[in-house]
Amino acid sequence: MSNRKLSAMKPSDGIVWITGASSGIGAAVALEMANRGWQVAISARSRDKLDKIAELHSNITAIACDVTDRDGMSKTAQKIEAEIGSLAMIIANAGIYLPTHFPKFDVSIFDDSFAVNLTGTVNMIAASYPYMIERNKGQIVLVSSVAGYNGLPTSAAYGATKAALLNMGEAMAVDLAKYGLSVNMVAPGFIDTPATKQNTFHMPALMDVTKAAIVMVDGIEKNRTRITFPKRFTFWLRFLTFLPRQLYVRLLSR
Ligand SMILES: NC(=O)c1ccc[n+]([C@@H]2O[C@H](COP(=O)([O-])OP(=O)(O)OC[C@H]3O[C@@H](n4cnc5c(N)ncnc54)[C@H](OP(=O)(O)O)[C@@H]3O)[C@@H](O)[C@H]2O)c1
């Protein structure tokens, strides 16, 4: 395989599979992609919620599956290939935010965050990769977060998983380009979803989930390696990465 510029997958290339699509960003992206002509397979643990999303568009098929179940994820990929169509794109979106509240050190928050956000993503890639690599064609989209750029308050576990996804995705983008596979990393700021509704603090530049889905799918369709939104907020978080780290820690710990 030559090291050529890769084009984005199109609906004619096959199916998109989205995890964590029973609510929030995943559900909004599923609907946006279905409206743009994609056949969409959606998964999450809540069968009833998935069915309600699938009822909204005839292009959407629901399959319940937990991302931490490696074997189950592999069977879901097999089912999609056998019953719906070829996997052209995966969007590893399933994620949980469990805040760390020091001085208590709760190791289960780290275990659970790593299992869903990080290993769950690896499980999805492992399940779909054999089909994509065999065809030398595919697009892998990893949903990270701006919390992956810098260490943020209460995000020691969540941020670690999201930083890992940015690094993992970049390394895979470098390695897989010559095999015809692209990797896109999505790093949203605050988006209005059931997950953020639980936050009691002020969320700067909170973005409507339908608008976020449009920006995200636009970026995916352009095969952008890094997709961030809302722009002004994510710019400032990127800017913080350039501060001297001692000053950064002093500012953020206030
Ligand atoms: N909202 C934001 O401000 C924001 C910002 C940056 C990044 N993100 C990221 O965007 C993604 C979606 O977040 P969201 O805000 O849309 O949250 P959400 O509404 O809570 O959605 C999370 C989704 O993940 C699924 N999920 C959780 N654990 C799972 C598991 N073990 N197996 C399969 N599915 C599982 C949930 O469905 P079930 O419970 O039915 O399984 C749900 O569909 C996450 O990766 C999050 O970290 C969100």
Image (cartoon, rainbow, N blue to C red):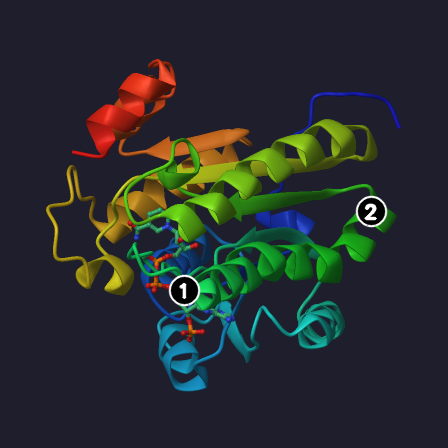
Q: Residues within 10 Å of mark 1 (few under 14, many from 20)?
A: few
The tag on residue 106 is 1
**Mark 1 belongs to which amino acid?**
Asp
Q: Write down the quadrant of residue 4 in the picture.
A: top right
Residue 4 sits above or below residue 215 on the image:
above
Rendered image quadrant of residue 182: top right
Residue 179 place in picture, x, y as percent: 82, 35
**Which callout, 1 or 2, points at the residue further toward the start of the chain?**
1
**Which of the four quarters of the rendered structure image does ligand 1 lie in?**
bottom left
Q: Please name whichever residue, 128 or 243, is drawn nearer the observer in this view of the structure.
A: 243
Question: Is residue 16 among what the camera can see?
Answer: no
- CA–CA distance between discs 1 and 2? 39 Å
Q: Please name the residue that numbered disc 2 is placed on.
A: 133
**Can you give x and y, in whole percent of width and height, for residue 178 in the image?**
81, 28
Quadrant in which residue 168 is drawn: top right
Task: For mark 1, give the secondary structure.
Answer: loop
Quarter of the picture containing the C terminus is: top left
Q: Is residue 21 above or below residue 245?
A: below
Question: 41 or 56, which lies in front?
Answer: 41
Residue toward you, 213 or 245 = 245
Provide the secondary structure element on which disc 2 rests: helix
Q: Is residue 38 visible?
A: yes
Q: Disc 1 vs disc 2: which is toward the camera?
A: 1
Few, some or many residues within 10 Å of mark 2 (<14, 14–19, 20+): some
Q: Residue 192 vs residue 84: left or right?
A: left
Give residue 140's position: percent from left, percent from top: 63, 45
Mark 2: amino acid: Ile
Vertical position of residue 209 compared to residue 52: above or below = above
